[in-house]
Amino acid sequence: MICSKKVALSLLTLSAAAIAAFFLYSKGYLRHGSFKKKPSSQCKKDIISKLPDDILVSIISHLPVKCGIRTSILSNRWWNLYRYVSTVKLECRDLLGSRYDRHRPPKFTVYFDEDKFHDTNLVIVSAIRFLRLRFSSTIRYFHLSCCFYKVTPDQLKEFFCTLRVEKLALSCGCYLRASVVEISVYNLSQITSLQYLKLSLCTLVPISNTQYSSLQIISLSHVKIKDGTIESIFSNCLVLRSLRIGNCKCPSKLCFKGPNLQLKSLCINNCKGVNRIEFDASSLVLFEFSGREMVDFIFEHVPQLQSISLYTFKENNVPYACSRLAKDLPRLKSLTFVARGDHFQGSVKSMGINMFNNLRRLDLSLYSGSQIDLLLLTSFLRSCPLLQEFHLNTNFVDIIGPEVKKQEEVIIHSELKKMEISGFVGTENEIEFASYILKSATCLEKMVISRCLKKYTGSARRRSRFETPWSEEMRRTIHARLQGKAISEAALVVIQYHTTAHIEDDNWGRTEDDCMIFA
């Protein structure tokens, strides 16, 4: 009850703040050059200014940064309140004006000298001046997107030394131009309060000496990573627990090693240049990799690694996932991988599958390939004796039709409790596979059969896409063929035949109007 009251009060506060901000902006009080003091005879009671400071700061936080600063001229009550806004987002347009022409000096505000345009980077200078105004208060989240044009090393050093933030999102390129600025790990270590960093469109270089940092989460996007940078990050960020590298240009070999490495989560997505990754991370729990081609994984010491995701959309990753991975990671509990349907079928037939003796969760997505037989998945299930949850997505795969032979041998799967099949068209082969699961899973609690396709997007999240619903006749056929087949008395079968596109976490929620449910 107390939590509900707090939530309601928070929503009420945000609504009031948004309405007040819209009122001030729409009346022109915060637009440049539009504030005019009215005669006292025409003045009305100032109700908004009587609100508590927290609400006024919340009002300012809903305004653009320039408009938020201009609230200081409304009255003495509003003076300096903008300095206590905890979230600040700045772009070149905010600092240089919306009429900026990259080929001509822009019309600057009162903060800037137009004559200095060709000698220095006015964006970084204005950002430093803004941060100095906020030096007495810590910014929780600071987002800066600018081109860092002609920035000097001294300016860059001063910028990072001036920052007092907990979370920093720094994009060194914008609508004006791309950036070639180099940022070193030393620069980042100058922000003593920094815990979260999102860095993009720059070059990241290492340092030779040690500068300890409080960073816990780092996300790199479209960054050129120089040799030794990853090692430099780990030697300086001793409490780093999450690292995400996406669309970056990397050295050929990446090493995630360190005597005191606290890294728990590592994601490498669509990076160029890397062909070998070495691990010696005693605290690593989750690893995700996606790219055009497979790389050579060397797991030297990863005793805590429980979850791994693999997605290579050019090279066949099934042989590695079905053979070597089980040997490298015998303690693995969760496996997610995406593969071409024909790659999967060919590899399973030719080489078989090694035992995953500790695997509890399997998320398999098969996409665009020749016709496949889903009953081959029964061999995968036999290699996972402790499997409890199985998600299967057949994305643009041609399933073999009625000519397929039925599975004669039924092997009991005593641990399987949850089964989901998405992209279910309703072919004979699909129905036979679903029927096999119902007849073999003695402890099955729930089976979800969905018409929509689901694309895995990483970190246990999947994107659903709307598909043409089944016909009424197909729904009845699926229901009739599966009803009464479950060996488990507690099994609940949910047939989802009408859904909308959305992003969801792993859950089994559904509504009564888009499902057919039977025991």
Image (tube, grey):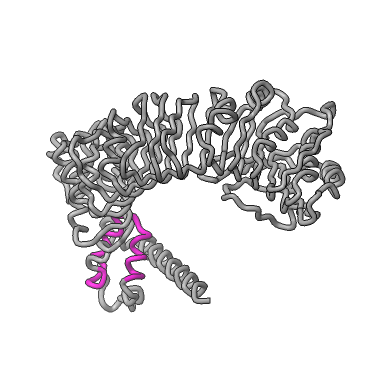
- The mark tally for this picture is 0
Q: Nearer the viewer, residue 168 or 49?
A: 168
Residue 254 versus residue 99 in the image, above or below: above
Q: Nearer the viewer, residue 293 or 405?
A: 405
Q: Quadrant of residue 227?
A: top left
Residue at point 80%, 34% (across, down): 427
- Residue 465 place in picture, x, y as percent: 63, 41
Q: Main secondary structure of the magenta part?
A: helix
Residue at point 34%, 55% (across, down): 64
**Residue 76 among those drawn in magenta:** yes
Residue 328 versus residue 387 in the image, above or below: above
Point out the stretch of residues depicted in magenta: 54-78
- Residue 99 place in picture, x, y as percent: 29, 41
The C terminus is located in which quarter?
bottom right
Left or right? Give the position of 206 relative to 286.
left
Residue 129 versus residue 5 in the image, above or below: above
- Residue 168 place in picture, x, y as percent: 31, 49
Residue at point 73%, 48% (across, down): 447
Q: Quadrant of residue 202?
A: top left
Q: Is residue 404 visible?
A: yes
Q: Is residue 426 visible?
A: no
**Residue 13 among those drawn in magenta:** no
Left or right? Give the position of 485 relative to 107.
right
Residue at point 58%, 33% (across, down): 338
- Residue 163 place in picture, x, y as percent: 22, 51
Q: Nearer the viewer, residue 128 or 44?
A: 128
